Image: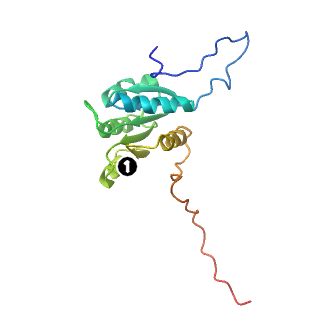
Amino acid sequence: MGSPLTRSRRVPRHRPEGATLTGVTHGLGRVLVVDDDEVIRRLIAVNLQLEGFDVETAVDGQDCLNRVSEIDPDVITLDVMMPRLDGWETAVQLRKSPETAHIRVVLITARAQEDDKNHGSRVGADAYLTKPFDPNEMIRVVRELASATPLAPPSSQPLTPPSSPPLAPPGPP
């Protein structure tokens, strides 16, 4: 078993005979946090653990690919600029494999150019956040991806109404 930052599970201190853990251990999902910067990796992991996610960590893309099948995450947060195997290629490899293609991927990176965001879409990322990021926004995105609901627009942007037929101009009274 890893350190508390590597895996978080709620375990009761005492469980009466016949009691079940239904409802007590129901987490929000499992997240694999991949970042070569230990401080960022811990920041993401702790924020997600506090929200109720089970969290595992990996130090780079190669570590992620080596462990992803054993961890079986619902969502992967993935830095882009990492040694050995960067986030772009890691995302491509995750999408290529039938065993991992279903896992939702959030790129969390300092690369904020429009070309980078477009590249993120091309490699199959489900969401793209730039560093420095708002932890609440990161949690919102991960929560939505883990529950397999479509991403809502960020709360700082106005919601656009669903398209509907144009209204007929008012007629004479």
Residue ID at (40%, 44%): 125
Q: Is residue 159 visible?
A: yes
**In the image, what residue type sits under mark 1?**
Ser
Residue ID at (32%, 39%): 80
In the image, residue 132 lies at what x, y percent? Answer: 38, 43
Display coloring = rainbow
In the image, residue 91 lies at what x, y percent? Answer: 35, 38
In the image, residue 64 lies at what x, y percent? Answer: 36, 28
Left or right placement of residue 120 versus residue 156 in this view: left
In the rendered image, the vertical position of residue 74 relative to residue 164, given as above or below: above
Q: Is residue 99 visible?
A: no
Residue furthest toward the bottom? 172
Viewer-proximal residue among 30 and 52: 52
Residue ID at (35%, 32%): 35
Left or right placement of residue 51 versus residue 79 in this view: right
The C terminus appears in which quarter of the rendering?
bottom right
Q: Residues within 10 Å of mark 1 (few under 14, many from 20)?
A: some
In the image, residue 56 lies at what x, y percent? Answer: 45, 25
In the rendered image, the vertical position of residue 2 relative to residue 92, given as above or below: above
Viewer-proximal residue among 165 and 141: 141
Q: Quadrant of residue 6?
A: top left
Residue furthest toward the left? 84
Residue ID at (72%, 15%): 19
Mark 1 highlights which residue? 121
In the rendered image, the vertical position of residue 150 relative to residue 36, given as above or below: below
Q: Quadrant of residue 41?
A: top left
| Element on which disc 1 rests | helix
